[in-house]
Image (spheres, grey):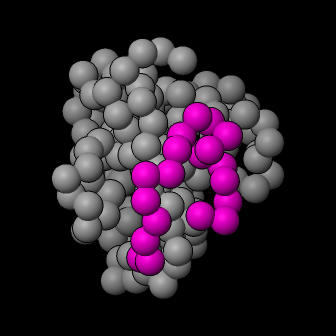
Amino acid sequence: MQISHIKYFQNWIPIIGKWMYEEWSYAFPLRTLQDIQKNLFGRMNENEMPITLVAHDERGVLGTASLKASDMETLTELTPWLSSVYVHPDHRGEGVAQALVSEIEKIARRQGHGKLYVFNPITQGVFEKLGWSVLQTLRYGGKELGILVKDISAPA
């Protein structure tokens, strides 16, 4: 498996956009699939946010994750955010999410950030397994979400 910047795999944007739309439309109900795909074309950066990575191998695209300055209309004081972590169901349990999250953490650390934030439905517990802790919970887009934080000031 390799982790690359999305700008080198723009042909996967329609697939990734569809994943994002299907997974998170509850949180952003006014965003269309076309809005999301257009937004992905704006994440071609390698050194400044927003940055989107893709995990891939000979089978194709496996998953994606982004680093953004803000990921919610509320809580704008928290920055930066790990965002849009998604692994196709056929590839879950293969370490794809862990590899993507680790690479996003490295990028954020290189940019001088000591903390990273993410939101996730509180019932999932995915990020807690990767060393994240719940900062607060709130209702957003009709779901109970955990706002999680991770100290990334030193490599794990």
The residue at the point 38 percent across, 65 percent down is: 36
Q: Is residue 75 above or below residue 156?
A: below
Report which quarter residue 91 is drawn in.
top right
Which quarter of the image is occupied by the N terminus? top right
* Location of residue 51 in the rendering, given as x and y in whole percent from the top left corner: 34, 39
Report which quarter residue 99 is drawn in.
top right
The residue at the point 25 percent across, 68 percent down is: 73
Seen in the image, is 89 located left or right of residue 123?
Answer: right
The residue at the point 59 percent across, 64 percent down is: 122
Which of the pair 13/89 is nearer the observer?
Answer: 89
Tell me where the magenta segment starts and ends, as one range.
122-140
Q: Residue furthest top?
A: 155
Q: Is residue 82 above or below residue 143?
A: above
Q: Is residue 30 above or below residue 150?
A: below
Q: Is residue 75 above or below residue 127?
A: below
Is residue 19 visible in the rendered image? The answer is yes
Is residue 52 visible in the rendered image? The answer is no
* Location of residue 44 in the rendering, given as x and y in whole percent from the top left corner: 31, 40
The residue at the point 47 percent across, 15 percent down is: 155
